[in-house]
Amino acid sequence: MDSKIKLGLTGLKPTDLLAKGRLIVANMTGNASFPGPVPTLADLTTALDAFEDRVEAAAFGDRRAINGRNNGQKAFTSMMSQLGTYVSFVANGDSEVIESSGFEVRKQRVPTTQLGQPIDFLAIRSKKEGEIVLNWKAVSYSKAYQVE
């Protein structure tokens, strides 16, 4: 199956991002599937430690420290994204290899086979001559309608 990696980095609290980073470093350390990660795990660990220091400093609410934490988060997220690209390339769609890295596998999209007909269809004569107002309840998974 052609699985894809789910980075899952957006919307995480800084502490959750740190935990995710530590998990990925732990899973990739000594993992034979990933012999030469980019960036290196040593560089990622150094970035994790620096980011953790910034998170701790920002806990007191100092604006400079919060700004530093935010900048550190951007830099660390960028490194994690690079690592995700590496994992995706090496895994070549193998979900077990992706999961062995600590990253998650993206859910497979399942196309809808057939849409139902709109329900509660209502046609009302408009106040403008030659116009009709059409209303109906939307069908799940529909994006557009063609009216003839």
Image (tube, grey):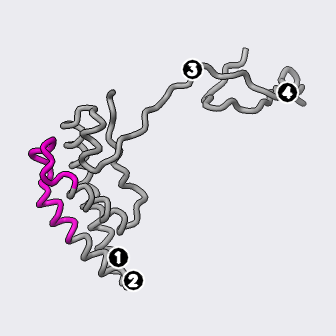
- At horizontal 26% and vertical 72% (from top left) the residue drawn is 52
Q: Which residues are magenta?
A: 27-49
- At horizontal 29% and vertical 44% (from top left) the residue drawn is 99
Q: Secondary structure at mark 3?
A: loop
Q: Which numbered marker is on residue 113?
A: 3
Residue 79 can be seen, yes or no:
no
Q: Quadrant of residue 43?
A: bottom left
Labels 1 and 4 touching (C-beta < 8 A): no
Q: Secondary structure at mark 1?
A: helix
Residue 112 pos. (x, y %): 56, 25
Labels 4 and 3 touching (C-beta < 8 A): no
Residue flagged by tag 1: what amino acid is it?
Answer: Ile
Q: Which residue is mark 4?
A: 122
Residue flagged by tag 4: what amino acid is it?
Answer: Leu
Say which of marks 3 and 2 sits in front.
3
Residue flagged by tag 2: what amino acid is it?
Answer: Gly
Q: Which residue is mark 1?
A: 66
Q: Which residue is mark 2?
A: 61
Give the CA separation, mark 2 to mark 4.
57 Å
**1 or 4: tag closer to the N-terminus:** 1
- At horizontal 28% and vertical 38% (from top left) the residue drawn is 96
**Quadrant where the image shows the C terminus:** top right
Residue 92 pos. (x, y %): 23, 32
Q: Secondary structure at mark 4?
A: strand
Camera-nearest residue between 126 and 25: 25
**Quadrant where the image shows the N terminus:** top left
Query: For the image shown, how many numbered marks are present on the structure?
Result: 4
Check residue 31 for magenta coloring. yes
Say which of marks 4 and 3 sits in front.
3
**3 or 2: tag closer to the N-terminus:** 2
